[in-house]
Amino acid sequence: MYAVTLAAPDDFDGWRAAARALASAGVAPGEVGWKVEGQEAGDLFGTGTSPPAGAPFPVPRAFLSLAETAICHSDPERFALLYALLLRIRTTPKALEDEADPLVRRVEAMAKAVRRDIHKMHAFVRFREVEEEGAVRFVAWFEPEHHIVRAASGFFARRFANMRWSILTPELSVHWDGEALTEGPGAARADAPDRDPVEAVWKTYYASIFNPARLKVGAMLKEMPKKYWKNMPETALVGQLVAGAQGREARMVETSRTQIGSNALAAWQAVREEARGCTRCHLFECATQTVFGEGPVTAPLMFVGEQPGDQEDLAGKPFIGPAGQLFDRALGEAGIDRGQAYVTNAVKHFKFERRGKRRIHSKPDAGEIEACRWWIEQERAILRPTLTVALGATAARSLFHKAVTISAVRGRPHAMPEGGEAWVTVHPSFLLRVRDNRDAEYARFVEDLVRVKERLAELA
């Protein structure tokens, strides 16, 4: 029996070194006991010795990234689960691609929970000003669900680089002196201040930016659970703001009507009208009409698909066919309001082959994508979206000006030269065609959309 003691609950480097040695020596998962220094070991861990160092072996980068995140989970079995998955990957390098596998799904779920907890910490930490030896320090209290404090603290060091601050949590505390992060022992809620003079100003600001037109109480409670409210001064205003939301929304709608002749909307309407007569490539000859994008011209989120399908070509609207219905369902599960996003296609005319009376979709080629890129660039120039999501390889090629592989660029941000970020995921039509692991592929698509939503909130 081998006993491994890690320095901290999130000690990825220690776990990685031990797991590499154990795997190289061929040690089975059941022969290893894992614990964190300072925890009670019990009889489970015995008095085993460290395994001899074996020959190094390659591990996919995706697994290392997954393990580094999942190891922050609070599940006491996480070390053993990750080691079992490492052994499987060593014999089956593509094991991570089997998202229906119970072990893979469990580890992926742990990583997802950790990412969401980090997002909650980034979103809901509230600093309060205190006097400390004649200088100002800002102190916050937070209660994470997982061991995420170290992983999340770099965000605060970057965002509040010019402040001296401390974040207190039950497990440990982190402190920033303007130059370096240091750690300290955990704290109690009573160690953090209750309020400060700045809170009145912050409440006034929060009330002024509260947008009743976007109020969805259920979604709000899902994204901002009440357990975080006691640490956030603005939540004291939520009740009265919600109560007055209907009246404020009516006033906002009336105001927006007087501003409908804005420059952005006028520019978009002009480009859309110009696109109706597009002859930049031969596709206009057989298609019923140009299918332009739709959505608010102030939308911070843009989705780019491949091209209109048969139903879209007839109706003149993007994403209303079977793939569009699946897309709407996934957006709903991810908590994204399609009405607040702009939806368009890389190619504006339907390309198809006739088979009897049916018109069968045909993939656009490089020349057609290039010819239609002008319209996408006009849409992006007008909207200036914070995030643009490419749905499928055609959309990604249009945005990046080159062919890319979805698996190589999926699930992470890509800075765009003209500003904003691009994210890449599969096209909803892929989910309609796939036969194996359809539920897993759909779940991964929804998770991509959730990460896009979380990233949009971070950038905002």
Image: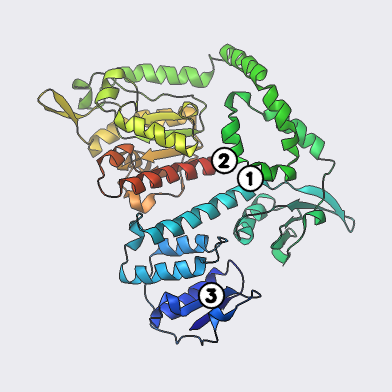
Residue 83, compared with residue 47, is above or below; it is: above
- Pointer 3: what residue? 34
Structural crowding at the residue carrying mark 2, measured as other residues with C-alpha within 10 Å and reported as few (<14), some (14–19) or many (≥20):
few
Of residues 134 and 175, the one drawn nearer to the viewer in this rendering: 175
Q: Secondary structure at mark 1?
A: helix
Q: Nearer the viewer, residue 105 or 166?
A: 105
Query: Disc 2, disc 1: CB below 8 Å?
Result: yes
Going by the image, does 14 lie left or right of 295?
right
Residues under labels 2 and 3: Cα distance? 37 Å
In this view, the mark in front (2 or 3):
3
- Residue 370's quadrant in the figure? top left
Q: Where, quadrant-wise, is the C terminus in this rendering? A: top right
Q: Earlier in the sequence, mark 3 or mark 1?
A: 3
Q: Position of residue 27 (x, y in %)?
A: 41, 80
Q: Earlier in the sequence, mark 2 or mark 1?
A: 1
What residue is disc 1 on? 123
Spatial separation of the CA atoms under disc 2 and disc 1: 8 Å
Identify the disc placed on residue 457. Answer: 2
Q: Please report whichever mark, 2 or 3, sits nearer to the chain's N-terminal start.
A: 3
| Amino acid bearing label 2 | Ala
Task: Give the residue at x 74% y 52%.
Answer: 141
Label 2 residue SS: helix
Residue at 48% in and 17% down? 266
The residue positioned 36% from the left and 28% from the top of the image is 375
Measured as percent of width and height from the top left, residue 404 is found at 32, 48
SS class of the residue under badge 3?
strand
Q: Amino acid at mark 1?
A: Ala
Give the x, y percent position of residue 297: 49, 24
